[in-house]
Image (tube, rainbow, N blue to C red):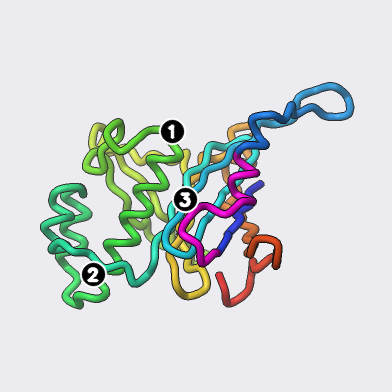
Amino acid sequence: MFCLCVETSSRKEPCLPVLWFALLLQDLVWESDDGQCPSPLHFNISHTSSLIACGVTVNSPIGIDVEEKQRKIKNNILAFARRYFSLYEVEHLSAISDSEVQRQEFVKLWILKEAYVKALGRGFSAAPFKTFTIHEKDATNSGASEVVVESSDHPVSLTNNWQFGLFELASSHYAAVCMEKDKTSDVAMRVPMRLTVRKTIPFVEDICISGTDAV
């Protein structure tokens, strides 16, 4: 079960519904009708100019990161990548001759790595970007490729208990989601990530945009 709430605003400060949601969780006692506590709720928040995203899951830790598609990189991209990215990722970027495509791939890699670190519940210093690699696995029979993470401490072993999602929002932002596979059953571990995406303009609009051109 996964719900991604996307919130847009022209203001620079966090919108009230997001703050309300974060504060409300501290005061709620989650209890079902039969007196048993339901499955744990996890959430994570990210923001950039004009957009705030909140990802919510049940049973599975989650990390989310968003960034503008047109985000400019002040530094030389490859020099910056050599400082923070793994050798494989640097080589991947170096092989891209088109500077604009290279910039977009850099932004995608960055937000995927951010989402993974946030899902782990660690800060940048506790999980340096150079210690793991994000890359695409070969396409499956369905034609869909899979994003995976590989630890430099165990290079032959892929960390297969994490799922990634990478997509565009409103043609203006990239969003990356990382969540741990649901361990409550073997079937759940094999289920692909399912996203429900909602766009919210505080006090004005709240609509589901899953399956539309906006995602």
Of the numbered discs 2 and 1, the one sitting upstream in the chain is 2
- Is 28 displayed left or right of 96 in the figure? right
Q: Secondary structure at mark 1?
A: loop
- As shown in the figure, which amino acid type bears the numbered disc 1? Gly
- Discs 2/1, front: 1
Residue 168 position in % (x across, y down): 47, 68
Q: Residues within 10 Å of mark 2 (few under 14, many from 20)?
A: some
The one of 173 and 139 positioned closer to us in this rendering: 173
Q: Which residues are magenta?
A: 9-22
User: Outermost residue, right direction?
Assistant: 33
Q: Which residue is mark 2?
A: 102
Q: Visible in this render: residue 164?
A: no
Q: Is residue 112 above or below residue 215?
A: above
Q: Residues within 10 Å of mark 3 (few under 14, many from 20)?
A: some
- Is 62 displayed left or right of 90 in the figure? right
CA–CA distance in space, label 2 to label 3: 23 Å
The circle on residue 121 is: 1
Q: Visible in this render: residue 150?
A: yes
Residue 46 position in % (x across, y down): 47, 50
- Is 156 displayed left or right of 2 in the figure? left
Q: Which residue is mark 3?
A: 46
Q: Secondary structure at mark 2?
A: helix
Of the numbered discs 1 and 3, the one sitting upstream in the chain is 3
